Amino acid sequence: MTDITYGVRETHALLADGRTVEIRPARPEDHHQAERLYADMSAENLRLRFFGVSRLSGRTAADRLCALPQPGHCALIAAFGGRIVGVAEYETGADPASAEIALAVADDFHHCGVGTLLLEHLVHAARQDDITAFTADALADNHLIHKVFADLGLNTARHFDGTEVRCTIRLDPDEHYLAAVDERGRTADTASLRPLLRPRSIAVVGAGTKPGSVGRAVLKNIHRAGFTGRLYAVNPHAHAIESTPCFPAVTALPHPPDLAVLAVPAHAVPETAEQCGKTGVHALVVLASGLDADQAAALLTTCRRYGMRLVGPNCLGIANTEEPVRLDATFAAHRPLPGTAGVAVQSGGVGIALLGGLSRLGIGVSSFVSLGDKYDVSGNDLLQWWEDDGTTDLALLHLESFGNPRAFSRTARRVARRMPVLTVDAGRSAAGRRAAASHTAAAATPTMTRQALFTQAGVIATRTIGELLDTAALLHSQPLPAGTRVAVVSNAGGAAVLAADACAEAGLTVPELPAGLVTELLGLLPAGASAGNPVDATAAVNTEALRDCVDRLCGHGAVDAVLVALVPTALAEATGDDPLQALTHAAPERRPRTVAVVLLDQAERVRLLHTTGGGSVPAYADPQDAAHALAHAAARADWLAQPPGTVPEPAGTDTAGAHALVDAFLAANPEGGWLDPRTCADLLDRYAIPRLPQAWAETEQEAVDAAERLAEPAGRVVLKAYWPGLLHKSDQAAVLLDLEGAAQVRAAYRDLSARFGDVMTGVLVQPMAKRGTELVAGVVQDEVFGPLVLFGLGGTATEILADHAARLAPLTDRDVHELITAPRCAPLLFGHRGAGPVDLAGLEQLLLRLSRLATDLPQLAEADLNPVIARPDGVTALDVRIRVLPRRAQDPYLRRLR
């Protein structure tokens, strides 16, 4: 059964200590338990809650809490193990925008975060109910509730009246509130993952007696890794497996294990999970694949009922190389090398490849989780774990899907400030594109949406596993480049050209070196060398000269990175000279810049060369791999150098009016649909989005009269036919331009009326717009990712030219700047071939207001402003299409489990 009261659904969430509670609306059948909650309270807590110690107060409170739902009243409970451990409710009075709240928590659940969690869900419900403030009366000495209110993250005012305090909480969730929710979520999340990643005891359920079984392989790997906790096997047909004591069932274990690894067939998973829950297991890893819908639902329900975190099903297992944990609960062939990279993957095959690559590079792994079908534990959970584990300095992800992309974005953006976060961008194919009607929706491909997420969050998105490992090697071993300027040094001219081309193709620059630096380099290198960049050191260069050359480039401010491309030569072989020593035998303090090497005869795609100073230098077999890694590193440095950005509040918006307009349309059209031109214009006006003046005409004379009013100052007008369902007017020849005078307007109206007949419900009359750069701006409400704002080159060929960029709303000031500068047409906006720049401030405002409209209205399915004319004197939307659907807002940051 699912309860829905004011947008509150039955859900589960984590307490500060990692335990799971159920959050749901109160029901009449909860009355006995609710009364029990108050009856079990100490006299002191009763006094603080009811300003007295009468037991009758608890009964009255339970009556109100469990009453049938009514307008203006919302009551929530938190249940643990079927027992009510906390309640919260609000009730409106004369002012429907303000509600009185009450909160109570069981004595033995104080300081666990129950009250704060309930309040967060109550805030969510209240905002759905258009409530803007909570009020509460509390005793002045009720320090616990005052701390709960103060730590909530919302603006709270207190008014003292003797021994009582009147608290008013403004329900305006801002960045401060979201940061407070983030911190509480991170604390709870990491606590819940400790039994999974730092277990004190493990049971492998389904460990087989035959060497080839998956369960036995897991048990063997746990032994081989040197796990220091208690280890059990569960198999009814053995007494010991791999020197591990074996028990017939989970319920027969002498101690409840923290972690159970389930290596049983799919059909046995739900019952085995139930046994684990009853025994007191805290976390499960389910290896089996092929669970049907009923088995999957039963597994997740069991995990939620007993508060067990779940990895899988359909996964390779987990590993944690930290001391003293030393956990390898996978069935991989090789043990992960201990190190500093955190790895989370959905594909077991990708996981094996990454584990092998990181081990070969010597980077190693801190913790590894094969997420599999990702029923519960996700990449978001792992990012928060790595943020605080004290070991991880590099996060590697392979995610085929996102459960809550906007929450992931917030977490990744925070974590990426502390360590590089890399991902393989899986699922880029056009097969993922949905059918779309508007230009904006057609342009908003799955790839563009994911790229927007990664770009805004500072996640380095690579196209292949190899590229990910290339980049990880560079980030692990070298400082970040301050920019994109690269000096290429080689002992062979052809290798230098390949490396320089690769840099240019990757978006890096290979600048000419200053004359003074060129002179210095030529003084270091053999006769015949050239130093214009690329630097051709010739085949005759020896180790000392090459080392001095690289050191000088690294010490000069002309470049941000040095790429050294080397080939084996007969001269070096004859003299016994090893050019690589120029890179490995160097003082680190002389090389503050990023250094990478290309060895064209190298067998491995990438490896790390250890230096005498204790560091390492990445060496690549292909210049393109090195260049892509350098480009990713430069992009990360640029992202870190920029401030995070803030979400501006555009002035002059009318959110309430916009909601009323959309609600009225949906009341008349319950299935949703496209707004007519007048409603579109009205909605844009609510957000002060500049548009061309217009008038609606249903007769020839109305069109003539409208044209007379609108013709100035251009002197000419446009007639656009309209009927419900018309989207691409140009395709239907439904737009007639450059009409001057009443005669031309009459002729145009008659032409449209003759061609479209009764299907045409009217025409839109607009003045001819001045010429300018034609752009497109729009919004698509993605079912998973939320609203996506798209911008780029517009007009009738916008889909063919495909010059667009996108960012997820809400847009920050930084997002808007990147959105405007990202398309290839950006030079046209900033002034091209002597032309002045367009109104960039006006363009930024248009995008910010469009973003605000999208975040305010979850009903907005898509909006298409095409074209938008940008000129030095202003920005104007000429044509607008907006589609709405009956949707409710969902808070992506509300703390709840998947």
Image: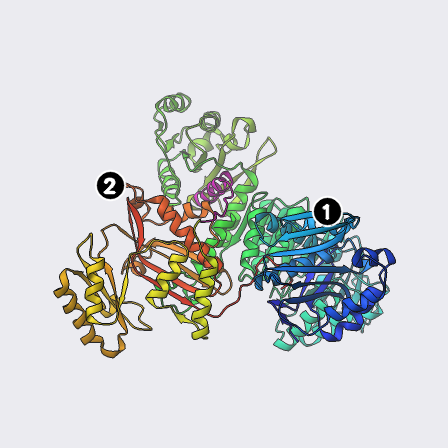
Residue beneath label 1, please? 160
Q: Residue furthest bottom?
A: 758
Give residue 72's position: percent from left, percent from top. Answer: 63, 67
In this view of the protein, can residue 455 be seen by the observer? yes
Label 2 neighbourhood size at 10 Å, few (<14), some (14-19), many (20+)? few
Q: Nearer the viewer, residue 801 or 312?
A: 801
Q: Nearer the viewer's eye, disc 1 or disc 2?
A: 1
Q: Secondary structure at mark 2?
A: loop
Q: Which mark is residue 817?
A: none
Q: Residue at x 60, y 47 (%)?
A: 176
Against 407, residue 214 (above or below) is below
Looking at the picture, which amino acid does disc 1 mark?
Phe
Give residue 282's position: percent from left, percent from top. Answer: 75, 62
Q: Which mark is residue 835?
A: 2
Q: Quadrant of the N terminus?
A: bottom right
Q: Nearer the viewer, residue 720 or 524?
A: 720
